[in-house]
Amino acid sequence: MANKSRSVARARRHGRVRKNLAGTAERPRLNVYRSLSAIYAQVIDDKAGNTLVSASTVDRDLREKLKGLKKAEQAKLIGQTVAERAKDKGIASVVFDRGGYRYIGRIKALADGAREGGLQF
């Protein structure tokens, strides 16, 4: 039961966060989803409803790089990768959507990685 209420609480927090931010073509939204084993990041244009770029720990082309790294280190690498891919598409600035998660640990590592990769938020 506790597990269910935790996920419901996160969904509620995410709803509160999303109420105040939306991605546009000029400044898309960097969305983060964290599961127990993986972390996913997407850059989304909410107006068009399109995912522009994405990266995650389950990407086939990133699996080799991620082997043997701690989860926070993996998250940082995902942040750098999503920033790189966004730069290639001409995206320099995003709105960070932490997805209802607290800004610590893997979420913070991903954000720091994305900033290092050159994304502004």
Image (spheres, rainbow, N blue to C red):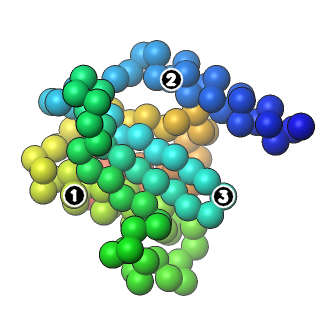
| Residue 85, label in figure | 1
Using the image, tell me which numbered label, if any, was put on residue 42: none
Label 3 environment density (alpha carbons within 10 Å; few <14, some 14–19, many ≥20): few
Does residue 44 appear to the left or right of 57 in the view shown?
A: left
Q: In the rendering, at what x and y percent does residue 33 appear?
A: 52, 46
The residue that label 3 is drawn on is 36
Whole-Å distance between the Cαs marked 3 and 1?
25 Å
| Res 35 visible | yes
Q: Are marks 3 and 2 in contact (CB under 8 Å)?
A: no
Q: Which tag, 3 or 2, sits closer to the chain's start?
A: 2
* Residue 52 x/y as whole percent: 23, 44
Q: Secondary structure at mark 1?
A: helix
- Helix, strand or loop status at disc 2: helix
- Amino acid type, residue under disc 1 in the picture: Arg
Residue at 40%, 68% in the rendered image: 59
Q: Which residue position is annotated with label 2? A: 17
What kind of element bears circle 3? Answer: loop
Estimate the x, y position of residue 38 in percent, counting from the top left.
56, 61
Q: Are marks 3 and 1 in contact (CB under 8 Å)?
A: no
- When the figure is inspected, residue 23 is found, relative to residue 121, above or below; the finding is above
- Residue shown at 26% from the left, 36% from the top: 50
Q: Residue furthest right?
A: 1
Q: Quadrant of the N terminus?
A: top right
Q: Nearer the viewer, residue 11 or 118?
A: 11
Quadrant assignment for the C terminus: top left
